Structure formats: C-alpha cells, structure tokens
Image: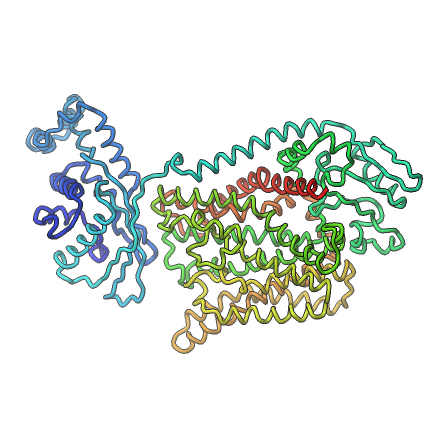
Amino acid sequence: MDNLFVVYDPSFLALVWPKIKNGVHLSLDRYCWTELSVFFRDYLDGHAWAYKTADASGRYSASFFTGNKFWLGSKQQCQMLNDAYESHEQDETWGEFYNRDYLKTLLKGDTNFGRNQQDWHALVQRDELVRRLVRADNAPPFTLAYSVLQLQLNLTSLALAKSYDVTLGVCLPRSCASEDIVSIINFSIMLNDHLKYNNSLTRSIKITSIREIQGYDIKDDVVAVLTILITITFILLSVIATLVDLDVFALKHQTLNLNKPNNNVETTKTITRPVIVDAVMKNANNAGTLKLCDAKLPPSITLGVVNMEGTGNCRRCGKYRKQCAISRQFDNFPPCPRMKFNSCASSNAEIKKTNGLVKDLLLSFSIKHSWMRVFNTNMANKDLAVIHAVKIVATFWIIFIHVAVAVSYVSNSGDVNDPGNMYYNIMATGTLAFDALFFVSGIFSAHHFFYLKGRYSSEEVLRCSGPCGQLSQLICFIINRAIRLLPPYVFAIFISSVASRAGRSGSALGGGAPDTCHQHWWRNLLYVTNLYPREEQCMQVSWYLSSEAQLHAGGAALSAALAARERPALALAALLLLAAPALDLLTPRGTLLREGYAWEGHVWSHAAPYLLGVLTGWLVHRIDGLLTVPKMWSISLWVWSFCAALGSCALPWVEVWGAWGAGAAGAAGGAGAEWVTAWLHLLWPAAGIWPAVVCSTKYAYRTRQLLDSRAWCGASRLCYGALLLHGAAASALLAADTALCASFSCLLCYYLGVTAATLGGAFCLCVLVEMPTCSFLTRLSDYVYR
C-alpha cells in the first residue's frame, strides 16, 4: 500500500541523482540543481539537516480511503530549518569549522569510540568545536521553502471512477521555482512507477496547482493596514462620542415644547423623562404635538415609534390597538397618539441650536447609544416575537453547518457525498436552515412595509402624491435597506479579504483559491454575487445576502401590489409560488451535495420561502389582530403544520435512499429525490405560516414576553453580524494545519468555540459600525430633509 501512494520519494531520488544530468533527464534552474545535489548527497551521507528536510515533506501514512487526503508533513519544521540557516549565516565564525571530512569522521562513532555512546555524548558536551559542528550539521547550507501541491490521484487498477484530491507538502531549496518543483515531483513519480516498480503500479497522478507558503506579514498587506486604520477610526470616534454623550445624558431635565392650539399659546415646560408618557396621554385629546430629539433620549422603538406600553388603553399604538388581549374592553377609547420620532428633524429649534449638526452626528457613534439600541426591548414588531426566535435558531444552525463544512474539509471524515457520512446528513439540512431565514426575512420585510405605509404617506416622506409618490416611496424603501446593511457588509468584506490572504500565504490548508473579495468586491456592493459561479463568491453567505436583497425588492413590489389591488396580487403570488419550484426542478444541479450544496442555488430556488413570508406578513397585517377560526379548523391546521415540518425534515433522507438504491430502482430513487427536494423549498416554509399567524395574533400577548428580555433582543440584532463574520471565524480552524477529529462531540466543541468568537465579533461590529452608521445616516437625512 505504501508503494501505491508514493509521490515524492527523496530516498530513491538521492540514489539516482548522481547518475542523471541537468538538461537531459531534467530541466532545472542552475542554482536549484546545485542545491538539490548537495541535499541528496548529504542525505546519503547521513547529515541531520538532510534527514529533517526530507522528514518535513509529506507522505502517505494510512486511512486514505476514509479521508486522509492531507499529506502535509511539517511546515513548522521546514521553517525552523530555514531559521537555523539564517542564524548560522549571521555567525561569521562557524563556517571555518565546517569541514565535511572531519565532521563525517566525528559522526562515525565506531571509529573513535566504538559503540560507547556515553563517550560520544560526553565529547559533545565538553568540546566546543564538536558542539558547534553538531549544531552546524543540523542547519542547512542554503535557504529552504515549504510548498503545497494539489494532486489528483486515480487508482485505475481498482476501477475507481473518480480521482481523489490529495494535498502534498514538500520542503525543498528556496531556489527551486514552482516549475522546478513540478518537474521534480513528476520525475519522482516516473522513477517510482517505471524504474523502481517496472510499471507494476497502474495509477495516474496529475498536479493541478502549487503554491509556496511564504508566511503572512501584515505590514505588506495594504488592505489589512487600511482595515486596521478604519477600525482605529471607529474606536476613536466611539470613545470621543461616548465622552460627549455622558455629559449630555448627565442632564436631569429635558426641554419640551407643547403647542396647544386651544389657547394658541406656546408653553415651554421643563419636565423629567419619567413623566413624558403622562404628558403624552394628557395632551392626546387636545391634539397636542410632542417634539423630541433622539440625540438626548435613549432610542425608543426599532421602526421609529415611541413605546406606549402600560398607557392603559392598549398594548400597541394606532391601528394595532385590536391586538391587545383586553382590547374589547376599550373599543370606545380613542386611538393611541402617534408621535413622529425622526431624530432631530422633529425636535425644537432650541435643542437643534444647542447641539449643532457636528455634535448631533458625532453622538451617533456613542457606545452608550449603540449599546442601548442593541439591547433595546421596545420593538415595534413585538407580536412577531416567535419569528425572532426562528431567526435566531436558523442563524445558529447555519453557523453549525458552515463549521461542519470546515471541519469535514480538514478532518479524516471520508467522502462528504457518502450518504453514510455524518457531515452529509448535517449539510443536507442546510436547505431547511436557509429557507427558514428567507421565510423570516419575507415576514419582516412585509411587516415593515405595511407598518410604514400605514404610518406615513408619500406626501409626508417625499412631498409628492399620486403614482409617482407611491413609486418613489417603494424605491426609497428598497434602497434604504440596501444602504443600511452596506457599512457592516463592507467591513466584513475587508476582514474576509485579509483572512483569505493570510490563510493563503501562511496556512497549508488555506486553499489555493484567489482572494475573491478583493477581486470582485463590486459584486457585493451591488448585491449580484449569486449571479456568478460559487468559486468566485466572496464569503460563505455572500450568495444569501445577494439573493435576499433581490428578493426583498420583489417582495416590496408584491407588498405594494397587495396594498393597491389585493386579488390580482394574490393571483400573481400563487403563480410565482408554483413557478419557482418548477423552475428549480428544471435547472440541472446534480445530487444534493455532489455538484455544489443545494442551499446555494439560484435566486428562484429560494423565491418560494420568501414569497410565503411576504404573504404571511400581509396576512398578519390584514387580520389586524383579530383571528376567529373554528376549533376544528385550528386543530387541523396545527396537525398539518406539524406533519409538513416533520416531513420536510425527513425529505433529505429521500436522496439517501435513492443513492443507496441499485439499478433502475436506484435511478428512479435519485430522480424522485431531485423532484422532492425541489418542492422542499415550498413545503418547509408553508409549515410555518399557521404558527406564525397564530403566535402574532391569538397568542401575541404571551409570545411578546420573549422580547422583554434584553439578551433575546440583543441576540436577534446580532444575527446579521454573526452571518457576516462566522465564515472568518470558522476559517480560523484551517490556520492550525492540523487534522481535526471527526466525531460529533468534537465537532460540537469546535462549533461552540466558533459561535462564541462569532458573537463577540458580531457585538463589536454592531456597536462600532452597524448601529453608529445607521444612526448617522438617519440623522444626516433628517437634516437634509429639514
């Protein structure tokens, strides 16, 4: 078995090397040829440095058919040998003692001391000359470099239809260029197959790529330096803004203007923050206008609405009054007063004059302000608390899947396309996790659209009405979200680009793929990454962000159509729901994992979950908190949802059965699996419609308690940052250059570590970048709008 997998054999090359000539048997660089000749000669003479150099190169060990495809050797040992040469090169006196004949005599212990090893060790300890000679024998006479080759090994005699991808690490003189190394490896393969074994090995080996591991120096990476400078800038802005913010929040009173049209007198009252809500309720019937500046008050509600919890007549504001569990007792109460809380655009002139534009924009970067926004429990979509829970679970499940992908790549996990492999079963559920996230995104998008449309008119936002105003409002709704998500996305692209170059330059397992984030950054800014091959995508979730942005635009258009003409829009939505799985079925994609993961499909592969989410959000808005369904229908819908969810979880096994089938039955099973998995995008989110509607209406009072926890609200807001950064955290596993264990308990440990690092990074990203830039753009637009 060892002979079958020999690729680079320095022992046999050392024996043959004196008999071959450069330019005849090989065509190498002159310096490369000379240093290789020294290396193979010292190898035959038994010098320590030559043994260590050969030992630093990788070779076959065992367990090839169960996933041992990384024959890396030791990059660290090769680097240590190179460092030893450099240290001896700086020593000007050691070269005069390097006499090969004398050293060879000393190394032959039989000549001087027979077989008494104790005398030899004593001589090494007390004789400075011998000690320096031994140290010199462990240092190479030239520089070394560690390179990684990607091979395709096909054992044709075993009738294996596919080639195995092998990663081989070699330690050779630095003077040997990439083409020289390829020539040496091919020459070694030829000698091994034709000369040593006389064509008795029927195999084929092809070198696909090679790269030298030079080590990563952050000072030579312009993007890394720029990323550090940007990070330092955000930190300095946050520290300065926090110091300013502490002085502002130290004030115990706020000045509020209450304009009362009844007496036509503008009265300025100085009231404390705890009595703000009381002032609102007392002046609600007088049509009073309350004007506040969010630069001086903590952030209230996610969608820009003042929290009205505990005001007595309802649990929500305005048209959401019917969602209160005890709303029937207050049917005759007037609606809750709506207050526009658009930062300083609605504040009084005195506060604007006091703060100023620069100070108000600076306060956007306050850590205290961002901290309060992250853990703010006053969310306008509290009735969708269960949907927040689904988003959190789906995000953590996606992180688990990507960690499994990274661990399966570097561990002896076997063939990932084998249905009996643990990683196959884990990654097969990726479709469910991403479809759940698309479904949740559709619900939030529709809820936000109808919420803003019911609160603001096109005249209030854009000062224009009619079809032009409606279209402009729709475009602003789409562009606003894209711009809001862009700053943390760009920062994550910088981090991913640096991590990619660091892994490529310093890690044997970093892969030979180019830095796609640096080459194709504009695709991410335009959200069109999913339109290009997977090999050219930047991050693991770049395809999801692009697909979700495109579906958000389509979902917004569908929501506008539902608001304008309900029945034609519903008919169009039904047609799209049937067309998306059918189009996905007609798209050739191979099996579940063999030709790319099923969850990284085209945009229409995930159109059905997103459209179902939009329809669910519209349905929640349409019933307006009042859900009256007969008990029998309710039980039937719960049973159907449970069975559909259970069946969707079991559907990935259908392809497993098809893969295990044989003959015509196996082919039919595979075709049936493709058909079923195409419709999985429709069945799985459909199972969540009824629970989402019920939990946001009938059981809204109970489920809303989930979002009373600051930790739960914070986890929901950190999901976006976690999706952006978990790929970089998982890729850190590859930097270790060690094979990870393949058991589920070990995988779980790595997952917990990656999750903890991801949440920490997501929190820093949210506090330093996402929340400050969002608040900065909001306040800047308020001043421009004013």
**Numbered-mark total:** 0
> Closest to the observer: 369 or 751?
369
x and y, in percent, of residue 490 in the image: 52, 45
Query: In the image shown, does 413 or 548 lie closer to the viewer?
Result: 548
Between 158 and 274, the one lying in front of the other is 274
Task: State the image coordinates of residue 652 (x, y, percent, origin top left).
Answer: 50, 65
x%, y% of residue 600?
49, 59
Specify the quadrant of the image occupied by residue 274: top right
Give the farthest residue toward the left.
111
Q: Give the image location of residue 414, x and y in percent.
A: 37, 57
Which quadrant would the C terminus be assigned to in this image? top right
Quarter of the rendering occupied by the N terminus:
bottom left
> What colour-coding does the image apply?
rainbow
Nearer the observer, 142 or 175: 175
Residue at x-position 52% and y-position 61%: 431
Rendering quarter of residue 93: top left
Q: Is residue 229 left or right of residue 354?
A: left
- Say above or below: 345 vs 682: above
Q: Residue furthest right?
A: 263
Dividing the picture into quadrants, the one containing residue 154 is bottom left
* Residue 448, placed above or below residue 226: below
Residue for point 88% across, 41% down: 282
Residue 272 relative to residue 244: left or right: right
Rendered position, 705 above or below 592: above
Q: Is residue 388 visible?
A: yes
Q: Is residue 608 above or below residue 386?
A: below
Q: Is residue 109 visible?
A: no
